[in-house]
Every structure is written in C-alpha cells, then in structure tokens.
C-alpha cells in the first residue's frame, strides 16, 4: 500500500482529468437535473358543448387537441411531470384552465388549438402569446389615474399573465425556432394577441395552433394519427429546447 500525499494526489493525471471534466460538464448536469424537475401543463382547447372548429364532424377540434396533448404527454412524462387541464370531453372556463397551471406552480403552460380550413395548411403553425395593451392600466385606475367602475369590477386574475409577457414571448420565439427547424412545418409564425385561456396564467404560457381541421372532408383516422404523431414529436422536442430558459 502506497500512501499518497494530498497535494500529489490532486496532481495525478486521472484526478486532474476528472476535475476538468466536472468543471466543464457540471453546469450541463445541473441544467439537465433542472429540466427533469419541470412541471408542464398542456391545455387541450375546447371540450364538451364547445367543439371548436369542425363542429359536428367526426373529429372536431376538441378531440384533435385532446389527442395531441395526450401524445405530447407520453413523449415528455418520462422526464417531466406533465398535467392536462382536461383528460375527457368536458367544458372548461378559460379561467379554470389557467388555474390548473397556477395551482401546480407549473414551469410552463401550452394551450393547444387547431386552425380551420381554408385558412390553414397541414404544415403551418402559429405560436401566440398573450398581449393586451388595454390591460396594462394599473388595476383599479383609469388611464387618467382615476378609479372607474369598470376597472374596480375587473378581476385581478386578468392581469397575471402580463407580468410574464416577456418570458412568454421568449418561449414563443424558442418554440417557433425549434418547430421551424423540424421537418413537420414549412411555416411557423409568432403573434401577440389577447388570449382568454392564458390571461390568468401566473407563469410563462403560450397558445399553439397546429394543423388544419377540414370540416367537410371525411376523416382518415390513420392519416390523422400519423399527422398528430408528427406534431407531437415536434412540439415535445420544442418544449425540451425551451425548458432550460424557463426552469430556474
Ligand atoms: Zn380553438
């Protein structure tokens, strides 16, 4: 047995290499561990008597968004906690959707919707973040600084998302970049508009509109499943790409 002096021990080539490796890889390991701890809320748009686009057709938007959310969840839940705002064909108020994410203290929320023909194609997506200039007026005051009846009546939850607008805008930009690089989409755009399901979300949140509902066309279930699989894979990858910028 050979006694090694502490100083010479730390100078051995193996230890120097190991310390160098940890110095370089340590931050990556830490960010990977953070990403594993993420809580992701997926919000399938519409539900119940609110069918969304393609009302009355065999596979309306409410079914489309739920199927898509479930496919994304399967891809992400090995590494993250993924919760859906609804898992069945039920109607939900916009405020209740944001409340699910707030209650879970989630790291991000993505509301899922689909566009409707003829204003879309199967290879386009739009990422929306909440932007409503009217709600920038401080709660309880008018634009002149005087309280008004309508301002007092306005519930405070309407303003929660505005505090996260920059993070949500960054999230939208990251998702756009990642989705645009995938083989699934030819065109991905970002837009800031008032969004009822997100205005009460106290966390980074976006609404993604993917795919194209064709109400008049017969639904080929196998083609649709393949299309949703492609969207889900691209969205799951885009969410993974965005997480390091969101999870502390
Ligand atoms: Zn919709």
Image (cartoon, helix red, strand yellow):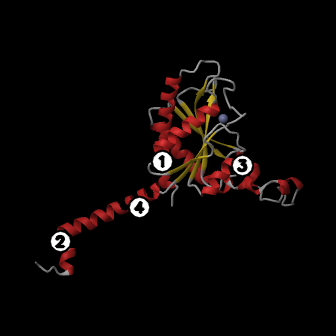
Earlier residue among tags 1 and 3: 1
Mark 4: few, some, or many residues within 10 Å (few <14, many ≥20)?
Answer: few
Q: Which residue is mark 1?
A: 77
**Percent position (x, y) of residue 125?**
56, 34
Mark 2: few, some, or many residues within 10 Å (few <14, many ≥20)?
Answer: few
Earlier residue among tags 4 and 2: 2
**Percent position (x, y) of residue 196?**
71, 44
Which structural element holds mark 1?
A: loop
The answer for how far apart the CA atoms under marks 1 and 3 are is 25 Å
**Percent position (x, y) of residue 237?**
46, 43
Point out the image quarter for the N terminus.
bottom left
Q: Are marks 1 and 3 in contact (CB under 8 Å)?
A: no
Q: Nearer the viewer, mark 1 or mark 3?
A: 1
Q: Nearer the viewer, mark 4 or mark 3?
A: 3
Q: Which residue is mark 2?
A: 12
The answer for how far apart the CA atoms under marks 3 and 2 are is 61 Å
The answer for how far apart the CA atoms under marks 4 and 2 are is 26 Å
Earlier residue among tags 4 and 3: 4
Apparent side of residue 172 relative to residue 55 in the rendered image (left or right): left
Q: Which residue is mark 3?
A: 95
The residue carrying mark 1 has its beta carbon less than 8 Å from ligand 1: no
Earlier residue among tags 1 and 4: 4
Which structural element holds mark 4?
A: helix
Mark 1: few, some, or many residues within 10 Å (few <14, many ≥20)?
Answer: some
Q: Would residue 177 be seen by someone viewing this image from the given angle?
A: no
């Amino acid at each position: 047995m050979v006694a090694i002096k502490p100083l010479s021990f730390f100078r051995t080539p193996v230890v120097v290499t190991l310390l160098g490796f940890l110095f370089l890889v340590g931050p990556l390991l830490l960010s990977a561990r953070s990403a594993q701890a993420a809580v992701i809320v997926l919000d399938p748009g519409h539900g119940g008597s609110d069918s969304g686009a393609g009302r009355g057709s065999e596979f309306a938007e409410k079914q489309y968004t739920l199927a898509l959310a479930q496919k994304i969840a399967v891809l992400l839940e090995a590494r993250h906690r993924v919760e859906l705002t609804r898992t069945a064909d039920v109607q939900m108020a916009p405020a209740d959707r944001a409340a699910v994410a707030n209650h879970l203290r989630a790291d991000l929320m993505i509301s899922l919707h689909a566009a409707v023909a003829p204003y879309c194609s199967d290879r386009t997506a739009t990422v929306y973040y909440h932007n409503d200039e009217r709600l920038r007026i401080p709660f309880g005051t008018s634009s002149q600084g005087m309280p008004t009846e309508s301002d007092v009546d306005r519930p405070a939850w309407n303003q929660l998302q505005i505090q996260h607008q920059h993070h949500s805008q960054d999230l939208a930009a990251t998702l756009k970049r990642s989705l645009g690089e995938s083989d699934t989409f030819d065109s991905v755009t970002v837009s800031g508009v008032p969004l009822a399901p997100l205005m009460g979300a106290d966390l980074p949140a976006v609404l993604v509109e993917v795919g194209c509902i064709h109400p008049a066309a017969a639904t080929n279930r196998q083609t649709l499943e393949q299309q949703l699989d492609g969207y889900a894979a691209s969205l799951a990858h885009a969410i993974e790409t965005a997480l390091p910028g969101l999870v502390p």
